[in-house]
Structure formats: C-alpha cells, structure tokens
Image (cartoon, rainbow, N blue to C red):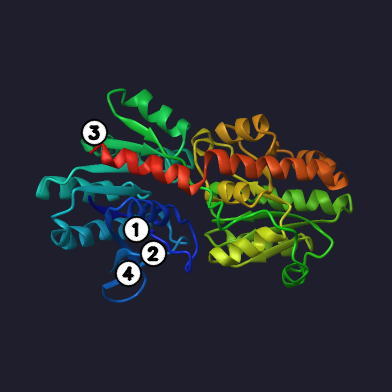
Amino acid sequence: MRILILHQFFNTPQRGGSLRSYYLAKALLNAGHTVAVITTHNQPGERVEETDGIEVHYLPVAYNNRYGFFKRIFSFLKFVLRIVNKAAQFRQADVCYAISAPLTTGLAAIWIKKKYSIPYYFEVGDLWPEAPVQLGIVRNFFLKKILYRLEASIYRRAVGVVALSSAIRQNIIQRFPSLTVYVVPNMADTGFFKPQPKNPELERKFGVEGKFVISYIGTLGLANGLNYMLDCAGAAMQKNLPIQFVLCGDGAKRDALIKSAAERNLGNVTFIPHQNREGVRQVLNVTDAVLVCYQQLPVLETGSPNKYFDGLAAGRLIIVSTGGWMKEEVENEKCGIAVNPSDAADLIRKVTPCMVDPNLLLAYQQNARKLAEARYSRQILGEVFCNVLIKS
C-alpha cells in the first residue's frame, strides 16, 4: 500500500520530541508499505528528505510551543492550506493517515478524500476541543460550537478513528456510537531504552551524584501543572531529603517555572533543555522515578503521554499525579505510585519507602519494564497499527 501521513509535528530520533509518527511510519515500512509524510519546519522553503526509508516533505510553517492560542491556530490553518497545495503529488496514495493534534489536520484529510477519493483514518491523541475548553483557553460560545462541529465532521468522514487510549475511545464512542474506533496506544521503544545502572559520568554531568532523582521529561506547558513538582521539591527540602527533581524539556511555562524555583531557593531542582532521543536516554539513566504530571481535569486523565512509555521501557518507577487509566495501571501492575496532586507531602511519603529499600524500588522498576515488553513494545503495537490500516 501507498500511505500518506499528515502530521504537523513529525519528529526524528535525531531531533527528539514525540516519535510516535516516526514509529508508525517505520512499522509500515517494515511491513512492506510505501510511506510519505507531510509535516512542517521553521525554515524558509520546502524540503524533502529521506529518513530511514521514510519520504518526509517539510513545509515552511512556523510553530513554537510557546505560542499563544490564536497564533497556534494560525499555524494550524496555514499547515492545512499548504497541504491542499501539496496534495496533488500524492493522488496515487491508497490511504491517508491524519494525526492530531491539531484537530485542523482533519480538514486537510477531508479535502484529500473529496478531491482524490483517498480514504483517511484520523488519530486522536488528545481530545480536542475538549482539552482547551476544560483548560479555559477556549471560552467563546460560538468558537466552542464551531470546534465541536469540526470534530464531529472529521470523525464521521473517516474510515476509522484511532485513539491512543481506551479512555479516549470510550469518550468518542459515547458521543458517536456509530463510529469505528480502534485503540493503538503510544509505544515503548524497548530496544533503545533499557534498564541500566546509573552512569557516574552522567550523574556528574547532570549534578545528581548521590541523589534519588525524580524526572519529568516532556512539554513544560499549561496542562502539565508543574508547579506541583516545585511544591514537592520544597517539601523534600524541608525534610532534608536527598531528592533531586529534574525538569527536562521546553514549553510555555518553562521560564515561569525557572523563575519560581529561583525565588523559592529550590536548589534541588534542575532544568535541562529539550533533548533528542539520546539525550533523553541519558536523563533516564540517572533517573530513579519518572513523574507523569497534569492539572486536575477529567480530559487530561485520558491522554497517552510519551514520558510514561519511555519510563516503562527504561525500567523506572512511575509516579502519576493524575487519575484515570494510568493510575489504575501503575497500581494494578505494581510498577508505580499514584500521588495526590494537591498535597506535595503525599509524594514524599509514598516515595520514601523506595528510597530506603533498594529492593522495593527495584521490584517496581522491574515490573515497569515487564509491562513495557508485554503490552507496549514497538513490535507489538506496530503490528496492531498495520493491521488497522490494512482493513481500509
């Protein structure tokens, strides 16, 4: 099959960030299909590259995760228009796979379907527009109505919808019971991320020698509620505990978090810039526990964050500050702990036993790796994904 993937935020291992669309494209290639990706870059002019057998078309559409809401919307719509102008090159494709966010990518998929009779699947990683509505970003009644109608239109015209979690699937099915919705979670790269002893050189590099390290790796944005992590750092300092909190990534709240940590004299907080895949592996090497952190909103409990799966693959204790399916899973699989996001002392209480008992920590970490291998490996989920698209 000839498959066209639309994803505004396609990343490669060298660049870093979410690699889901890269993993999906590789799975299709390994199954014998031909794959082309339309994405964006922050440079002038178009560019075509072949990355590990994937034909990637980069369109000049500026974007930065520090953009405000309306500047983001402008970038999203510009991507759609660029796809419309580019799509004729791919009229021989057998199927189109459109990835959100943003939701607006579905507009391009609809246009391609009408113009060239190419069926499409639509992937839902975050529930839009429900997420920005619950976050208070979208408040205007008429804008909400337009966005919800757009969501419904995109879903109903798709051959199928691919949800990244069973919670997302349940939400969609409840509102659109006639849809075909598959679940293909994010993937754990169990071949690249592996449980390894801490490297003393990396501990020195990151300044965490002799520390119990709790890392957050990902976007430092509004939805992530990372002031909670600073509160936990303050609670650890009060008890004089050897815990180092590492925030690795970039986002709209990064500068504010750095400023707040400095004002509170939190010497046990380290900020590391956005890393490529190798950089993330280094951070995970010195990490004891990975924190998955979100604001307390129902819609944010449905997500499928990369940091969770990377942490599982690396065999690290998982700390979840949200409810929903991840909380249930880490407790059922005994690979992590769920904490109260309104009570920083709760994290300290629950993580202390793992600090004083290395065997307990190791048991959690081994269970995390087992879960990654059994349920979320690239090999398993890549095959599941390919089987979904073959049905078209």
Name the residue tied to disc 3.
Answer: 156
Q: Amino acid at mark 2?
A: Tyr
Q: Which mark is residue 8?
A: 1
* Distance between mark 2 and mark 3 Cα atoms: 29 Å
Image location (x, y in percent) of residue 360: 81, 41
Asked if the residue under mark 4 is in contact with the one under mark 1, i.e. CB atoms within 8 Å, the reply is no
How busy is the neighbourhood of tag 1: few (under 14 within 10 Å), some, or many (20 plus)?
A: many
Amino acid type indicated by mark 1: Gln
Answer with the quarter of the image where residue 347 lies: top right
Q: Amino acid at mark 3?
A: Arg
Q: Position of residue 260 (x, y in %)?
A: 69, 60
Kindly state the secondary structure of the residue where label 2 is placed.
Answer: loop
Residue 320 visible in the picture = no
The disc, 3 or 4, on the residue closer to the chain's N-terminal end is: 4
Q: Is residue 52 above or below residue 178?
A: below
Secondary structure type for disc 1: loop
In the image, is 362 to the left or to the right of 386?
right
Q: Position of residue 106 (x, y in %)?
A: 27, 46
Query: Label 4 amino acid?
Result: Glu
- Disc 4 is placed on an element classified as strand
Q: Quadrant of residue 198?
A: bottom right
Which badge, 1 or 3, is on the more N-terminal residue?
Answer: 1
Residue 61 sits above or below residue 245 on the image: below
Mark 1 to mark 3 CA distance (whole Å):
22 Å
* In this rendering, position of residue 381 left or right of residue 269: left
Q: Which mark is residue 50?
A: 4
Task: State the residue at coordinates (25%, 54%).
Answer: 4
